[in-house]
Image: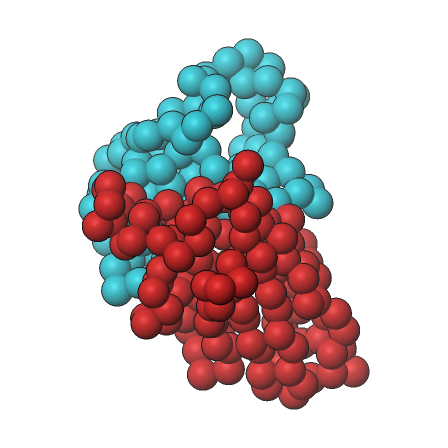
Chain colours: A cyan, B red
Amino acid sequence: QTVVTQEPSFSVSPGGTVTLTCGLSSGSVSSSLYPSWYQQTPGQAPRTLIYSTNSRYSGVPDRFSGSILGNKAALTITGAQADDESDYYCVLYMGGGIWVFGGGTKLTVL
Amino acid sequence: QVQLVESGGGVVQPGGSLRLSCVASGFLFDDYGMHWVRQAPGKGLEWVAFLRYNGRSQYYGDSVKGRFTISRDNSKNTVLLQMDSLRIDDTGVYYCAKDSARIAGQIGPHYYYMDVWGKGTTVTVSS
């Protein structure tokens, strides 16, 4: 069974930079898994941030960026703001019409 | 603008059934695949099911395979999720989401992500 791993929690200071990662319990994440990233605040629907590793979705500020770091996908927030405090989820496309979400990272800005 | 509105959630006993609906507007519904994604209380997002634009191919997460059925009615711009043999751990908010690729990537590229989300409908399985 495929498990997509994310840090359970992370904190960043206002104005700081933070990198969240998305890995696989077995194997490496590459662009061929089309990693995408979503932001969710409590009680709200998810919001699309990044697709296909490093493409920013329409309307997403450029302080959000995606990449592959080593064997993981990464979401970097540069110049973190208070309203970036949210849960962040990555999704990997495993092929054959199957997607798998990571467990999510709760980001605190303080 | 592009909008997805889910309905059909409610309270049901274990072993029961429920059918969720998601009505789409603002885009060519016939051209896009659709997903269902759920979130148990206090937990993360879980991909549930995907249906191709033409309704001919359905895909499911392991936890719902054999119990849930995704379908669509293109004449009503609606995607459905029939949930049978419901279990307590099926409780949560169910979101429908639009796939990003038009006609499975035949028109434009396929980047395999969900681009637009509904606000969700809540399902509670409890005795």
- x%, y% of residue B6? 63, 58
Residue A50 figure quarter: top left
Q: Quadrant of the C terminus of chain A?
A: top right
- x%, y% of residue A83? 64, 24
B12 to the left or right of A10: right
Return the residue nearer the eye: B46 or B83.
B83
- x%, y% of residue B20? 61, 68
Q: Residue furthest front?
A: B75
B25 versus A47 height, above or below: below
Total numbered circles: 0
- Say which residue appears at 67% left-offset and 85% top-offset: B16
Question: In this rendering, does residue B82 appear at all?
Answer: yes
- Say which residue appears at 64% left-offset and 20% top-offset: A82
A5 to the left or right of A80: left
- x%, y% of residue B89? 62, 72
- Say which residue appears at 36% left-offset and 34% top-offset: A74
A19 to the left or right of B37: left
- Say which residue appears at 67% left-offset and 62% top-offset: B7
A22 versus A95 height, above or below: above
Q: Quadrant of the N terminus of chain A?
A: bottom left
Residue B82 figure quarter: bottom right
Question: In this rendering, does residue A76 appear at all?
Answer: no
